[in-house]
């Protein structure tokens, strides 16, 4: 089984983990600073809780959308619909909103 060499496997695995980290960005203090422009009371604790919720609740029907690939206006439009679909309570909704909108696309 020489044709599946180790290098090839490593390249594939790093692509997969790159894609995942991308959709589910791991919150850093820099993200908190950026998010504070939209949510002045944002904390790293909230973002850390939110990333788990986002991964668990938002990827069952479709792929997880990369927060920065969706504009802020689009998030505002979709989030209330998705709250119903994912059966989020208001606390969960608030956390997920902070997570995705801290990084939403700035194209409009
Ligand atoms: C029960 C299934 C289901 C769950 C759970 C769900 N979604 Fe969706 N989502 C959909 C469907 C179906 C659409 C198609 C568009 C529509 O409803 O208007 C969609 C569309 C979207 C879109 C729009 C994509 C686009 O480019 O038009 C976004 C963004 C989104 N969902 C985010 C989320 C988030 C965030 C969560 C978690 C809070 C979530 N979804 C949970 C079913 C789901």
Image: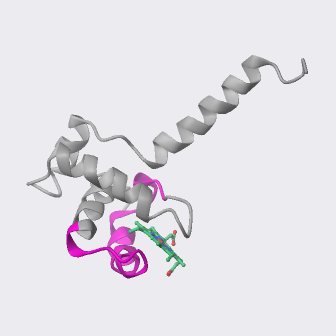
- In which quadrant will I find the C terminus? bottom left
- Residue 73 sits inside the magenta stretch: yes
**Rendered position, 93 above or below 25:** below
Q: Quadrant of residue 6?
A: top right
**Rendered position, 43 above or below 71:** above
**Rendered position, 82 above or below 96:** below
Compare residues 107 and 84 and report the one nearer the observer: 84
Chief SS of the magenta region: helix
Colouring chosen for the image of the structure: one colour
Residue range corresponding to the magenta coloring: 65-91
Compare residues 101 and 48 and report the one nearer the observer: 48
Residue 20 in percent (x, y) is at: 52, 43
- Residue 83 sits inside the magenta stretch: yes
Q: Is residue 106 visible?
A: no
Residue 75 in percent (x, y) is at: 36, 68
- Identify which residue is drawn at 37% across, 82% down: 84
- Identify which residue is drawn at 15% across, 57% down: 39
Residue 27 in percent (x, y) is at: 30, 41
Q: Is residue 8 visible?
A: yes
Q: Residue furthest left?
A: 41
- Identify which residue is drawn at 8% across, 54% down: 41
């Amino acid at each position: 089984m020489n044709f599946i060499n180790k290098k090839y496997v490593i390249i594939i695995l790093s692509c997969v983990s790159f894609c995942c980290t991308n959709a589910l960005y791991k919150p850093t203090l820099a993200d908190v600073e950026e998010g504070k422009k939209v949510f002045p009371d944002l904390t790293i604790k909230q973002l850390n809780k939110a990333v788990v919720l986002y991964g668990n609740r938002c990827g069952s029907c479709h792929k997880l959308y990369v927060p920065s690939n969706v504009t802020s206006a689009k998030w505002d439009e979709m989030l209330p619909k998705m709250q119903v679909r994912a059966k989020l309570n208001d606390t969960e909704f608030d956390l997920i909103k902070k997570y995705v909108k801290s990084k939403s696309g700035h194209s409009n």
